[in-house]
Amino acid sequence: MKKDILEKGAILQRDRETYAIAPHIPGGFTDTATLRKICDVADKYGLDLKLTSAQRIAMIGAKEEDLDAIWADLAQQQGAPIGLCVRSVRICPGTTYCKRALQDSQSLGLKMDALYHSMELPNKMKMGVSGCVLSCAESSVKDIGVVGTVKGWRILVGGNAGVRPRLGELLIDDVATEEETLAIVARIVEFYKNAPKKERLGKIVEEMGIDAFRAAILEKKSCESCGCGCQAG
């Protein structure tokens, strides 16, 4: 794919002539004004619309020469549907709306989205935040999955779907606060950014073993004794 097309967040379609784009809709939460604008732009350029599993709205059938004008009319951030980056943070309704939710997944998820959406990484990364163990955000098949429980947050790592599906493994359970959860997620992302191999997080967890990975993330210690100022785990 041409670099300029990639930078425009455009995905070549089956006809090999048109493209799909996806404006960023954090966690799938939006408003009527945004929906009206998307519909107006779709009508103007003759685009089809598809609600995606990543809680975005794909706009399909764009001509290459119209891409810049479409984004200008939308005046919205790209949804990062492609590329080696944090693709999406999928978020369930949480305690804001759902009677079954145990934790405020909307608050936590939107903070994670603001921090990480479209961040460049060695490979693609997906995140899911669910307010209860029913896991409507499919957190167990995300690179980083966060699930609300009665006691707090459960953090899973290394999940993915695709050709070789893999369930995320338990990193830590009963994380009491949103702040602690964000701090642990930050450690995972930082560890992954510095990984020597450009492969999905699940592959790294497999190669290290979950116990070694857990130690690297949760038992990080300052190596002041060596005087280098680095962080060793």
Image (cartoon, rainbow, N blue to C red):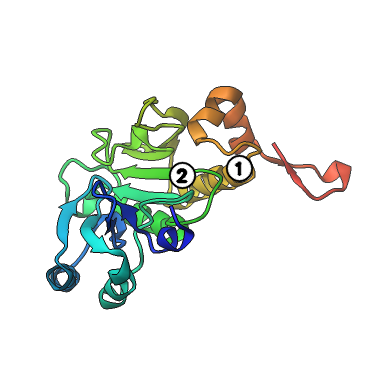
Decide: is 54 above or below 206.
Answer: below
Say which mark, if any, is on residue 76.
none
Distance of mark 2 from mark 1, alpha carbons?
Answer: 14 Å
Which residue is under mark 2?
124
For image coordinates 36% across by 50% down, the residue present is 89
Instruction: Count all numbered tags in the image, as a single digit.
Output: 2
> Image check: 76 left or right of 154?
left
Residue type at mark 2? Lys
Q: Residue 154, position in %: x, y? A: 40, 36
For image coordinates 35% across by 63% down, the residue present is 78
Visible in this render: residue 39? yes
In front of the other: 11 or 219: 11
> Image check: 142 left or right of 49?
right
Under circle 1, the secondary element is: helix
Q: Quadrant of the C terminus?
A: top right
Which residue is under mark 1?
191
Decide: is 113 above or below 192.
Answer: below
Q: Residue 179, position in %: x, y? A: 47, 52
Residue type at mark 1? Phe
